[in-house]
Amino acid sequence: MTEPLLRLSGLTKAYPGVVANRDVSFDIARGEVHALLGENGAGKSTLVKTIYGLVKPDHGTMMLAGQPFAPADPHAARTAGVAMVFQHFSLFDAMNVAENIALGMENPPPQRAIAAQVRRVSDQYGLPLDPTRIVGELSAGERQRVEIIRCLLQDPKLLIMDEPTSVLTPQEVAILFETLRKLRAEGTAILYISHKLEEIRALCDTATVLRLGAVVGTCDPRVTSARDMAELMVGAVLQAPQKADRRAGDVVLTLQNLSARAPHRFGTALMDICLDVRKGEVLGIGGVAGNGQDELVAALSGELRTKAGMITYQGRQIGQMSPNARRRIGLLAAPEERMGHAAAPDMSLTENAVMTAMTRQALTSYGFVHWARARAFAQGVISTFDVRTPGPGTAARSLSGGNLQKFVIGREIMQNPDVLVVNQPTWGVDASAAAAIRQALLDLAAKGAAVICISQDLDELMEISDRFAALNEGRLSVPRPAKGLSVEEIGLMLGGAHDMEVARNGREAKGARDAQKSGVSHVDG
Amino acid sequence: MITLDKRPQPSRLWTIATPLLAVVLTMVCGGLLFAALGKNPVVTIRTIFLDPLFSEFAWYYRPQLLIKGAPLVLIAIGLSFGFRAGIWNIGAEGQYIVGAICGAAVGLAFYPVESALIFPLMVLAAALGGIAWGMIPGVLRVKFGTNEILVSLMLVYVAEQLLAAMALGRLRNPQGMGFPGSRNLAQYPSATSWINESAGMHWGIVAAFIAVIFAYIALSRHIFGFQVRLSGQSPRAARFAGVNPGLLVLVCMGISGGLAGLAGLFEVAGPAGQISIDFNAGYGFTAIIVAFLGRLHPVGILLAGGLMALTYIGGEIAQSNLGLPGAAIQLLQGMLLFFLLAVDLLTNYRVRLRKSEVA
């Protein structure tokens, strides 16, 4: 009988109005990949922040390797051997890999020593990474490797990973899993947080499920079905979205060699995108973040203007049209970033409704806003899409991510678009809300609208798309019927292949790509 | 240990209460400052804040309050649009000067003709002059991405030189025995902005009230005000909502420049009377404080303009009656802005005192 590496007993943490963790107890053994499952708001983040010393529990104790463990801050946790890779990377775009790693150290050795260490660790664990590259030029998968290597340099006993695969291609996921298995074989414990149940089944040894802050079950993911785990998480029987039988209609939107310069230094240029979108279809566009998704949405919403003929909508050339002119004729969009892009955090939901709905819902006359009408429209979105909020007067920032996402998507759907472009419609949204959003998108398509769904979640795309295309380095693959696509084919479409090369070759490939980029003509403005 | 918790929504109570708290804190710390200068703090604070309104000479000071407050309110209303949208026009002083020069030049060109059309023409010229001066930083920002803070501020000094050149050159009173300064517009019936000089009423006060009402309607009811607020809070969301950021910069610079120019005209054709080398008295800069003290809200700005005028008048009384140094008054005004910015935190954060947790 060996003692566990980390034992949590009775951890409780309450915030005003909500108990984030309620009497949470479980063990993590040495050399175990332990999954932590739960919907958004189930208390996963609070729990790992407690372990990482960012949050102090109200009650309960932790034991690390038999010793009482109560880290006062992340520094203390790191010293004790706990490392964490966050979902959002804390890297400086303008610095190179080695410099970024040095920034996280107490007494950084000289750059050359760090570079050598990075090379050694990256060889040892099969994580290709060149320490001299500028972080701003790295893919999301490579950035994550920087974070992982930063952790591995501390020789951790426990590595916490928060949603590590949400930004990776299937091939990158395979590389990551190889690394994690090597770590496990060396006796490092891994606490793995994810929504993606199939991954957990492939990787993890044990899973602890949280719901509303409390542990509701423990299972062996290797023998439990994904559906059973999902229902344990949600506490209800899941409804899979119903795909109504529908036939694609006429072409409503055509992109003809759509090209645009990168709007900022770390943006992506769009290159020769050609696409026909038909009424009544859901077109899924996959791809790793930073491959032109934001730019494509901006070009479609009108935030980024292109040559008029590059975008044709119902026979009209609209590349130069303003966002509101496009809304008037039925082309709506919902960008990825909720806070500060799709919604203004400090404004009320009513004001956020005015933001995009004023043209189609006639919320103004002679420039004067009909606040009563706007409030009614916002209330309609709230009740139709089950947005949990006290009312339309609430500030957008006080809503949880999932609720705000429901509001943002609902706001566009309630305007009856002919074409709706959504980017990451269910990012960070819990399972039941995500299902509701997907169903709403499918219903919209069933009514004859065209839906372009850009997402990094391949399961989601396969679930709702009729056709699938992939964005890679600002280029769009030829769309293919989604039915029957295999994971390998999707992976190749995503262009994950170039990421498989070791860093040295990657550098040359990058140079070649830059040369291509500079060949693009200037088209914005 | 003191901790700050972010409120889910800005507190409505504190939005109103913070300016009042700032005034109270300024009175307390100002009192300490005056005590350190060897003055009776209670008497000094009373002299500054109450005497202009309630002393036996209040009949004289009350009109002064209107005269001092009107340009502050008018300029601050104009600035508040830009400030809400994240467009930092610091050069209202320059736009005020150029507006005054343009308006006065039109009036002086007609001298000594009497016509009811002259004053409206002067108003128009002043507004256009202020707008033109404000457009310089605006256009430079939109076209070349320059920083409007620096450009508008530097243009103040250019405007001051222009003012001196005008007072000594083209606009100098031909019958002025060679002294610098223009003819006195206040004594030119068709050009003066006075309505009733003894009551302190001039057209600038009327204009200030009209500006407050228009700004209030624009910000709360009109889509333009909505776009201004949206641009300030979330520039990216504003672009998504269809706001043209360049156009917004130009419109906001135009509004603030135009209103500052008007304020300059009403001043030069009334209380100041003439274009002189030292015509500008810093209203354009003080209006920045007024705008923030009033929380960029039209009604707040009206009250803040009144308060600021009060400290000016009260400060002068304290200087002459109590021998308080002028710098102490400026310190008091600066303190007001500092306290306001500091207690502003309470609107968005909750301060909690709690026992330090065992580490």
Image (cartoon, coloured by chain):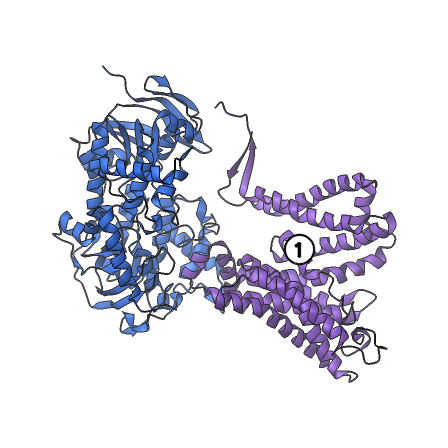
Determine the residue located farthest toward the top in the rendered image.
Answer: A1
Where is residue B4 drawn, in percent x and y? Answer: 53, 36
Residue B77: give x, y in percent of width and height.
63, 61
Q: Quadrant of residue B351?
A: top right
Circle 1: is it few (<14), some (14-19), or many (20+) Cα within 10 Å?
many
Which residue in the structure is indicated by mark 1?
A: B290
For the question of whether residue A162 can be seen, the reply is: no
Which type of secondary structure does the marked residue at label 1 adopt?
A: helix
User: At 31% across and 62% down in the image, what residue appears?
Assistant: A417
x and y, in percent, of residue B264 in the image: 70, 68
Please state if B188 lies on the left or on the right of A371 as rendered: right
* Chain to which mark 1 belongs: B
Residue type for callout 1: Val
- What is the quadrant of the N terminus of chain A in the image? top left
Where B205 falls versus A349 (above or below)?
below
Q: How many marks?
A: 1
Image side of residue A264 versus residue A128, left or right: right
> Which quadrant holds residue B216?
bottom right
Rendered location of residue A258, percent (x, y): 28, 67
| Chain coloured blue | A
Residue A429 seen in the figure? yes
Q: Quadrant of the C terminus of chain A?
A: bottom left
- Chain letter for the part of the structure drawn in purple: B
- Residue at figure coordinates x 74%, y 83% from the top left: B110
- Looking at the image, residue B245 lies above or below residue A108: below
Considering only vertical position in the picture, is B41 above or below A495?
above
Looking at the image, which residue is at 30% across and 64% down? A518
Residue at far bottom of view? B113
Q: Is residue A163 above or below residue A210?
A: below
Q: Residue at x 81, y 49 (%)?
A: B325
